[in-house]
Image: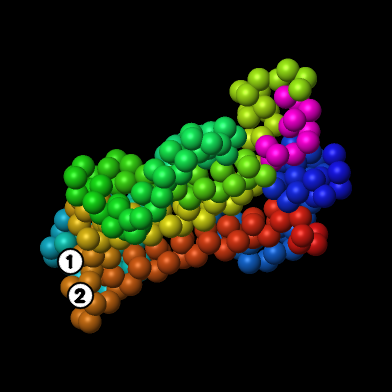
Amino acid sequence: MSKSQAASADFVSPDLKNHSGRKTIFKKLKKNKAALIGGYLILFFIIVALVGPYFTVHDPLKVDYSTKLLSPSSTYWLGTDHNGRDIFSRLIHGMSITLYIGFLSVLVGLLIGVPLGIVAGYYGKALDSVIMRFIDILLAFPGILLAIALVSVLGGSISNVILAVGIFSVPGFARITRGSTLAVSKLEYIDAIRALGAGDFRIIFLHILPNILSPIIVQATIRIAIAILIASGLSFLGLGAQPPTPEWGAMLSQGRSYMFDHPHVALYPGLAIMIVVLAFNIFGDGLRDAFDPKMKA
């Protein structure tokens, strides 16, 4: 393999199976303070989503009009909403719903988009044209409008939101995977492996896929932030999680009527969405820099 081709292979992705490659990636991440903060926040959110609901004092669904619209206090840390429900408890329970939607919808997009991108990039020709024209059709619709259309047809529920946001994520994964596959499949060592009698399945899963993981991982991390934002937007419009589900977008929608008299009802769900999305974006940017071989360790 020539030096230029070796450099191209390294640019596609460091070898994640190689110890020195992993060590270099972690070293770059450690130097990126913003990425570390984002990573720690994501880990904290995941832990809270898993164990937090078991430690909340108040029932997030219990309606008590005698305690409605109370300001933050020692009893209700973030106050109560218009139905007297504890906002803190609803935020904690809503975190698991929000992360569940974010991770699962991106997984749906990944499982559909990555195979399409690999097939298009590896086989090319007519198959590539058909797949990419389908991707272009999806890209012709603005993301939020595509998600709104799908949820409007399927109905408002968490499972339908996951499916809609997952389909919205397919074009991004497909295009990135196709580009990376095209770059790797043209390298000499792929031709050598094929000349030795390796089949397409073996080449794709043992030699191409491991070398294109880094852009896919970065895309997935950033897409989780976008998925959370889109899902919250759908719930805000009344097309996602339905009341009384403690989903952050729905909570923000219900709290907008009290913005001036009781701003805490909408403030805390809005802050929660902002912080989670910001954490994933910062961590995704850090991962992108860590995987880039042009960045010094």
Judge by depth and name the residue closer to the eye, 273 or 119: 119
Task: Judge from the rendering whether residue 161 lies leftward or rightward of residue 16; answer left or right.
Answer: left
Residue 263: x and y in percent read 27, 77
Quadrant showing the N terminus: top right
Task: Name the residue rendered at 70%, 39% in the picture.
Answer: 186
Rendered position, 251 above or below 120? below
Q: Residue at x 80, y 59 (%)?
A: 297
Q: Amino acid at mark 2?
A: Tyr
Residue 35 percent location from the top left of the image: 63, 62
Is label 2 in a helix, a strand or a loop? helix
Under mark 1, the amino acid is His
Helix, strand or loop for the magenta stretch, by majority: helix
* Residue 149 located left or right of residue 47: left
Foreground residue, 88 or 192? Answer: 192
Mark 1 secondary-structure assignment: loop
Label pair 2/1, CB-CB below 8 angstroms: yes
Which is more N-terminal, label 1 or label 2? 1
**Residue 274 as seen in the image, left or right of residue 115:** left
Residue 258, numbered label: 2
Region rendered in magenta: 184-194
Residue at the disc numbered 1: 82
Judge by depth and name the residue closer to the eye, 35 or 85: 35
Q: Is residue 113 visible?
A: no
Q: Give the CA separation, mark 2 to mark 1.
A: 9 Å
Q: Nearer the viewer, mark 2 or mark 1?
A: 2
> Residue at coordinates 34% horizontally, 65% vertically from top-left?
269
Give x and y (percent) for residue 111.
47, 36
Residue 278 visible from this viewpoint: yes
Residue extending furthest toward the bottom = 260
| Position of residue 138 measured from the top left corner of the image (x, y, whole percent) | 36, 49
Is disc 1 surrounded by few (<14), some (14 to 19) or many (20+) residues within 10 Å?
some
